[in-house]
Image (tube, rainbow, N blue to C red):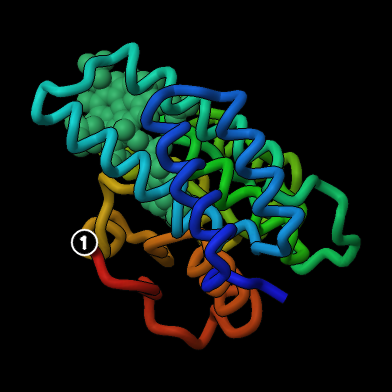
Amino acid sequence: MTQTGDASVREQLVRLKEAILNGDAKAAAEAAAILKEKGLQPLEVVNQAIKPAMDEMGKRYERLEAFLPDLVLAGEAAQEALRVILPKEGEESFIKGKVVIGTIYGDIHDIGKNIVAAMLSANGYKIIDLGNDVPPERYVEVAKKEGAHIIGMSCLLTPSMYYMRDVIRKLKEENIRDRFYVIIGGAAVYPDWAKEIGADGWAKDAERAVQLCDALMEKGKELPKPVILGEWR
Ligand code: B1M
């Protein structure tokens, strides 16, 4: 049972947020461990501390109040907290489907993608994580080899989103577009982009990414595409 109303939980959520903003990985891991011990679910910690801290860091960066090294340290602190709270692969044994996932070419932002991958894994999907900066042809090659059901692409960097189109183009060229559901997410991409490139779905966050994969695996053939879960911005 979670206790987000508990004062000590609120205190640790604030501590975690501050630790990330200060780039203090040790303090971030400690706060995350206490929150886990108190029974908070991984997505509660993500939504109430990690994501707001990273959004705040992005705003500071835009206002020139923070610089690239600050982003790097904040990213490392966030990853450290995630290592503590996210479920480990194999904690669930049933397999609903296989997902090949990665951050698209040119983009090395992988925190959100790692959260999505871990939540899918915890919800019964076998994950093949290609990492970041993934060339379009690599998604296709691995999806074919692994007999994946879903290809998931994450993108936070606007100039990189165009490579997502190349993945779908390649699937069509090889006459295998119907073999995989293609889903996209990440702060740079939006529902109309999913529609424009012919993706099967877009999800705003990790929770909805799980719902999206479930919906596609259960009744994907019947659903009008793209399936959009959540509001953009
Ligand atoms: Co950079 N960065 N960054 N960065 N960075 C952003 C994205 C930016 C918005 C900051 C800003 O200007 N405000 C901006 C992009 C602007 C744009 O193009 N639209 C930016 C920039 C410009 C850059 C560099 C170019 C800076 C430079 O070098 N001058 C550079 C690019 C490097 C590259 O990729 N080639 C760069 C570098 C970095 C670091 C390496 C320092 C670091 C990343 C560390 C890492 O990921 N390991 C970093 C960080 C930390 C950020 C911010 C501050 C935080 C990103 C983050 O982790 N968010 C970011 C500002 C921001 O996002 N507000 C910024 C938290 C994470 C939980 O959220 O990833 O959105 P998110 O994931 C969510 C959802 O989007 C969704 O679920 C997740 C969980 O809810 N989701 C999916 C994600 N993937 C999904 C896939 C799905 C479904 C849902 O289906 C498959």
Q: Where on the picture, by quarter, is residue 125?
A: bottom right
Q: Position of residue 126 (x, y in %)?
A: 77, 53
Q: Position of residue 10 (x, y in %)?
A: 50, 59
- Work out whether 109 lies above or below 227: above
**Three-letter code, disc 1:** Arg
Q: How many marks?
A: 1
Identify the residue under disc 1.
233
Residue depicted at x 46% and y 84%: 223
- Pick whichever, 209 or 168, lies toward us: 209
Q: Position of residue 122 (x, y in %)?
A: 74, 59
Residue depicted at x 76% and y 54%: 37
Left or right: residue 2 versus residue 6 is right
- Quadrant placement of the C terminus: bottom left
- Work out whether 215 lies above or below 168: below
Q: Residue furthest front?
A: 7
Left or right: residue 63 versus residue 68 is left
- Pick whichever, 114 or 215, lies toward us: 114
- Work out whether 155 lies above or below 218: above
